[in-house]
Image (cartoon, rainbow, N blue to C red):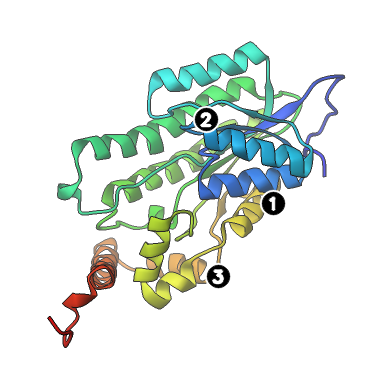
Amino acid sequence: MSSPLETTPGAGERRYIMITGAAGGLGKAFAVECASRGWDVFLTDLHAAPLHSLAAGLRATYGVQVRVQPADLTEPDGREGLFAALRAQRLTFWGLINVAGLDYEGRFYECTAGQIRTILRLNIEGTLEMTHGMLAFRDPRATFRIITVASLAAFYPMPVKATYAASKRFLLDFSLALREEVRRLGVTVTVLCPAGMPTTGECIRAIEAQGLMGQLTTQNTGTAAAQTLDAALAGRAVVIPGAVNRLLHFLGGALPPALVARLVAARWEEAHRRRALHAHPEALPGQPA
């Protein structure tokens, strides 16, 4: 499948889709899915080595054009350096997938000031500036597709993930507002709101600690990426992968936010207890000293 463009590029002209956080689990899934559809991709992440490794694999497997540029999206200089590279290469884009984001799970008062700042700088500041900056590189002859990764946590107050959930709520509300602003420009905005995803060892351990509910709400990254790309091409606003997650979203919307926060807190406390027991099985009752 070729790039979903309304016009054909001129001789020697390539059009790319930008993927931030491309070396992570979900970013890599988006990169593979885009490349498998025959789309040329531009990948950015913090470190160069995993980007170049991924790029080599995509070129060899799918025969697409892949460009990479490492950048620290938490810093203004890092973002401007990326944009400067795009200007120097005279590149044109038909899409942006904002995947880059992070969380430091734990009680707010136990997080460091640096951790809190980093969440805000990457999840909010970095995503907004990437979105704003990439609009300058869009091809006006074609629909420009923006995908921003929020979270199912965007719909709830989330104890133990308070800053992260609030940052994702910001992205959800921002994206829905931006969607209306840029509609007349031929730009679509789609927000992905997944639950747990097995993207890192830490994420997998957190999912396991949640027991059955963690297993039921977890989604495969490749499936989520494919579904989201299809939704973006169709111009849909919000994607929540998984029937269980959509049900949770519906039920959560019917409950008072304070009650949701208390239920979430109870769930996380139980998950943390399980993780602690898994890490220190000698603490289990009845175990010999």
Residue at numbered disc 3? 243
Q: Is residue 57 above or below residue 126?
A: below
How far is disc 3 from disc 1 in space, using C-alphas?
17 Å
- Secondary structure of residue under mark 2: helix
- Secondary structure found at label 1: helix
- Which residue is painted at 46% across and 32% down in the image? 46
Q: Is residue 254 visible?
A: no
Q: Which residue is mark 2?
A: 48
Residue 225 in the image, given as x and y percentages of width and height = 61, 52
Q: Nearer the viewer, residue 165 or 222?
A: 222
Which secondary structure lies at badge 3? helix
Residue situated in front as seen by the camera: 76 or 231? 76
Of 225 and 167, nearer the camera is: 225
Q: Which residue is mark 1?
A: 230
**Residue nearest the viewer, comparing 204 with 50:** 50
Q: Quick one: label 3 or label 1, which is nearer the N terminus? A: 1
Spot the residue most to the front. Answer: 289
Up the image or down, 167 lies above or below 215; here it is above
**Residue 86 in picture, x, y percent from top left:** 61, 18
For the question of whether residue 216 can be seen, the reply is yes
